[in-house]
Image: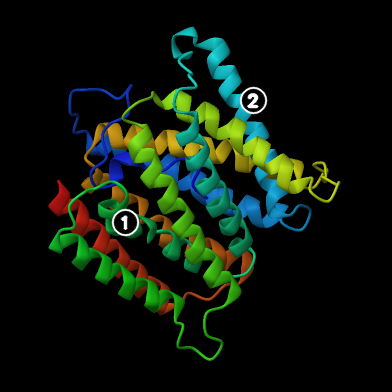
């Protein structure tokens, strides 16, 4: 469900090229922006459920990216000062977007198979994967704290996924875990690329590359379903909510430390659990909340020590 990775929430991440240099600590303002981000992420999940009967995941990604292209072109047209898009890091953009496209498609696939709360809880494990993989991919030091955070996060994932249950790992649960792996790969690449290019360039290649990927995959059978009267609104919401939520998240991270903002993001879990119960009759599972709390603790431990 993530359009952009919350960069400042990841350990060892440098600020984007156009981020403010002076630290700001306005937690109340950050909380208001996070309210917008939480609303956007939750709206995207609900809209994805509504669009699923009319489009496969590749088609949803195609039309979502098309909405993103329109928004980015409008920004570039209205803001000449933001026209800073280059091609020198095209190979990194390609690697990043392939990883994100894979993870996002798996997320939309899992969206229709498992409860919303379980999907969100498993998605929150990706920063732990980043912290564990960063020493191998980015050459960062593997600390005892990162190992402890990874172990805690793994315990939380086990509690949420419950592979020991009668059915074992379900298709939806496995897809959600693989989606988190895809998001982690995207995050690792993003940590490299944000040191070299401004955010507008990342967003530009994000929407255009993923539109191209979506068209290729959705049209591999020679057919791409056009938006219908029933799916046009959900697809538009998915496209707008994705970019809007991450804009709000980025603003929140610019107004308060990640250790303050990230716990606010975890409010998505109880909110989406209530939404799933009211709209779809999904049960409120103790395992999801217990595992999600442990994953949150692992993330907070990592953030606290890294800070």
Q: Looking at the picture, how far across and down is residue 22, in whole percent?
A: 18, 23
Residue drawn at (59%, 64%) of the image: 110
Residue that label 2 marks: 70
Please state the horizontal and vertical placement of residue 226, each as a whole percent of the image.
Answer: 82, 41
Cα distance in 3D space between marks 2 and 1: 35 Å
Q: How is the image coloured?
A: rainbow
> Foreground residue, 283 or 187?
187
**Left or right, residue 222 beside residue 66:** right
Viewer can see residue 271 = no
Q: For the view shown, which residue lies furthest in the right direction? A: 222
Name the secondary structure under disc 1: helix
Image coordinates of residue 266 in percent, x first then y, are: 36, 56
> Where 296 falls versus 103 (above or below)?
below
Which sits in the foreground, 156 or 45?
156
Q: Residues within 10 Å of mark 2 (few under 14, many from 20)?
A: few
Q: Is 155 situated above or below 36? A: below
Residue at 31%, 56% (x, y): give it: 133
Q: Nearer the viewer, residue 151 or 268?
A: 151
Q: Position of residue 254 (x, y in %)?
A: 28, 32
Image side of residue 48 versus residue 305, left or right: right
Q: Quadrant of residue 257?
A: top left
Query: Are the residues at dot 2 and dot 1 in contact (C-beta closer than 8 Å)?
Result: no
Task: State the residue position of label 1.
Answer: 133
Q: Quadrant location of residue 17?
A: top left
């Amino acid at each position: 469900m993530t359009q952009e990775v919350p960069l400042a929430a990841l350990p060892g991440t440098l600020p984007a090229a156009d981020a403010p240099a002076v630290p700001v600590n306005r937690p109340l303002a950050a909380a208001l922006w996070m309210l917008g981000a939480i609303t956007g992420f939750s709206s995207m999940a609900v809209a994805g459920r509504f669009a699923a009967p009319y489009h496969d995941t590749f088609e949803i990604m195609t039309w979502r990216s098309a909405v993103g292209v329109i928004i980015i072109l409008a920004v570039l047209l209205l803001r000449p000062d933001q026209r800073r898009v280059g091609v020198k890091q095209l190979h990194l953009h390609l690697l990043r977007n392939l990883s994100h496209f894979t993870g996002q498609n798996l997320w939309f696939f899992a969206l229709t198979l498992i409860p919303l709360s379980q999907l969100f809880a498993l998605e929150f494990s990706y920063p732990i994967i980043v912290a564990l993989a960063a020493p191998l991919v980015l050459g960062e030091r593997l600390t005892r704290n990162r190992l402890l955070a990874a172990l805690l996060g793994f315990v939380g994932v086990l509690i949420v996924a419950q592979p020991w249950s009668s059915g074992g790992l379900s298709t939806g649960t496995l897809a959600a875990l693989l989606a988190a792996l895809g998001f982690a790969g995207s995050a690792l690449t993003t940590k490299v690329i944000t040191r070299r290019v401004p955010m507008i360039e990342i967003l530009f290649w994000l929407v255009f590359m993923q539109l191209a990927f979506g068209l290729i995959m959705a049209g591999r059978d020679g057919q791409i379903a056009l938006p219908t009267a029933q799916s046009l609104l959900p697809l538009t919401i998915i496209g707008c909510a994705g970019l809007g939520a991450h804009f709000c998240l980025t603003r929140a991270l610019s107004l308060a430390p990640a250790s303050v903002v990230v716990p606010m993001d975890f409010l998505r879990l109880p909110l989406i659990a209530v939404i799933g119960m009211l709209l779809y009759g999904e049960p409120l599972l103790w395992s999801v909340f217990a595992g999600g709390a442990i994953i949150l603790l692992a993330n907070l431990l990592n953030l606290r020590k890294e800070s």
